Image (cartoon, rainbow, N blue to C red):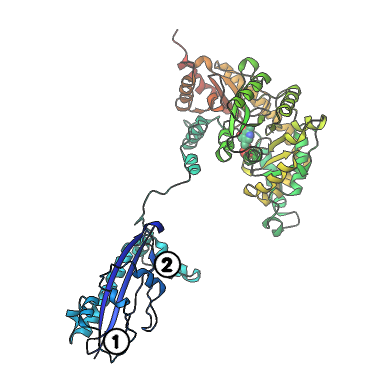
Amino acid sequence: MSSVVSSVGFVCSSAAEQRTTVVEIQVIVAVQDSFGGISSLPPACQANKINNSKRAAVSFHFPNSREPPPAAATAAESYFPANHMTRPVFSNSDPDSDDPTRKAPASTGMRLVVPLQGVVQGRGGLILGSLIPCALFYFLQFYIKRHRSSPASSSSNPPSPSDSSTDLVELPRSSSRLNLSGRGSIGRTRLSARGSSISKPNDSAYYIGLDRFLEDPYDEIKNPDGIINLGLTENRLSLDLIEKWLSNNFRDSALGKLGLNISGISAYQQFDGLFELKVAMAGYMSEVMGREVSYNPLQMVLTSGATPAIEMLFFCLADQGDAFLIPTPYYPGFDRDIRYRTGVELIPVHCRSSDDFVLSMTALEQAFNNARKRGQKVRGILISNPSNPVGNLMTRELLYDLLDFAREKNIHIISDEIFSGSNHGNKEFVSMAEMIESEDFDRDRVHIIYGLSKDLSLPGFRVGVIYSFNENVLAASRRLARFSSVSVPTQRLLVSMLTDTGFIRDYQKENTQRLRRMYELFTAGLNEVGVECSRSDAGFCCWVNMSRLINPYNEKGEMELWQKLLNVAKINVTPGSACHCIEHGWFRFCFTTLREKDIPLVAERIRRVVESCRPPA
Ligand SMILES: Cc1ncc(COP(=O)(O)O)c(C=O)c1O
């Protein structure tokens, strides 16, 4: 009669240099013949290597008694202490040990192998010898399950995609929650340094003000005490014209006049834009920028808004840690849009009220030299023409000077001309493209940014343009465009809109008139309550001097006034410090989100703040 004896051994051993913990489990089941000898080599149960987080599937090998133990098991054996209870089993070197007639080496050997031998020998041995290993197996599995940390390793047989959904539905809720819970988590979920720095709360008054507006937006009926937003450069003055065109043309332009051409809108297209849209865009840009220049569609890369277009150019022109010069005050979004991912530095070149905030070439030269002295590599200059926030335009002479400066210093010029069609004053807008066409300048260093967010009041459509004379920049930008392409239905719709020359001309004329009228009414409203605006000729903002209302005259005083405007008057504006203005007490007021009838309310709210700031008589 034979009985089954068993032994379960655990060996844990760390191999420090491999940074792994090896857990070996041996389950030894020996068939004991009636003479008390071992008639067959026990199956070796060998656990795989288990890493530090104790994730592992346990595999068992039951070798034929004539076969040598698996290599891994042999290797694992070396971790056993010399006198370990199971060692003699594996080191059984008797070639005849599988001979059933042969007597077992000795019952003392059995004792070494099976500590429970005394219990299991005899008549009850068969039963107990079967139950004990089963109980130990069960315990082991339970132990391993409890110490497992990753649901991914919870099964040695991951569910196949085909059965996953039904299995998941049928999974008992408590069990699925156990698997998903954070048991065994060894630390907080980490972000990259980049991700962490971007995820920090906004520290710019520009974004804080916009967030506050979203929490409590003014509505004439539903929230009359809410915040009025003058902090966003969005033009709502002519949306009715866009709406009318879209209601008449949306279907045909987006889906095709001859009915739905699904592959024309659903298939992959060139990520840098449909050629038809580039042609239409070239025509539109000539129209709004004064028809003096013709734009070449082959020099265009279309992007999802001007923001990625700018970032892409910086990515192509400067390396991390390099710098660009930028006249102040500047659009507060540039700090985030340019620096977040490229790591390019922006060096302010301060413009002053005494120069009407016009860029001085002396200040530019100085900023360049100072940067060089600090060891910074200056790769270019970024201008915004027309300027946001000031609303002034660069003269032809200034553009000449800038081109000379760029050639002399061997740097690039990026000219952001996104407001060029929103010129409501009497001054002429001159594009860098026109300068390049008219004179023999070094074209390779000039790059223009344009888009439809401002002049065509379509910021939600997300369409921007890189217009460059540099083939390498264009080649790189075309490739980068895959990360920020415009959806094809949007492009098809815009081809129709931009080539509707009647609509574009009417829109342009009407929008300019509305901009001019609103600007006049708004600045007059502010003047009435004692707030003075500098002259602006383009764009959606007034650049407002409130310096006499701040006390103390420093950035702190400016921020206190900004908070009063936001929290007391419930008007969100952008303080000059967010635009890096060197003089305190200037604010940007965007007037194109308002309706004419809102102006008295805005003026009244500002008047209250102005009066509260006046020094007592
Ligand atoms: C000067 C300037 N450039 C670029 C942008 C970004 O435009 P977009 O919304 O098309 O990304 C803005 C938006 O206000 C801007 O004022």
Q: Which residue is mark 1?
A: 39
- Residue found at x 43% / y 66%: 168
Q: Is residue 469 visible?
A: yes
Residue on which the image places disc 2: 169
The reply, left or right, for residue 163 in relation to residue 258 is left
Q: Residues within 10 Å of mark 1 (few under 14, many from 20)?
A: many
Question: Residue 244 in the image: x percent, y percent?
Answer: 68, 42
Check disc 2: other Cα within 10 Å, few if <14, some if 14-19, many if 20+. few
Q: Nearer the viewer, residue 241 or 44?
A: 44
Q: Is residue 531 above or below residue 435?
A: above
> Where is residue 477 drawn, in percent x and y?
68, 44
Q: Is residue 264 above or below residue 511?
A: below
Residue closest to the eye, 320 or 464: 320
- Of the residues tagged 2 and 1, which is closer to the observer? 1
Residue located farthest toward the front when viewing the structure as drawn = 94
- Marker disc for residue 237: none
Residue projecting furthest to the top? 617
Query: Which of the 4 image quarters holds residue 181?
Result: bottom left
Q: Position of residue 376 (x, y in %)?
A: 60, 30
Residue 260 visible here: no
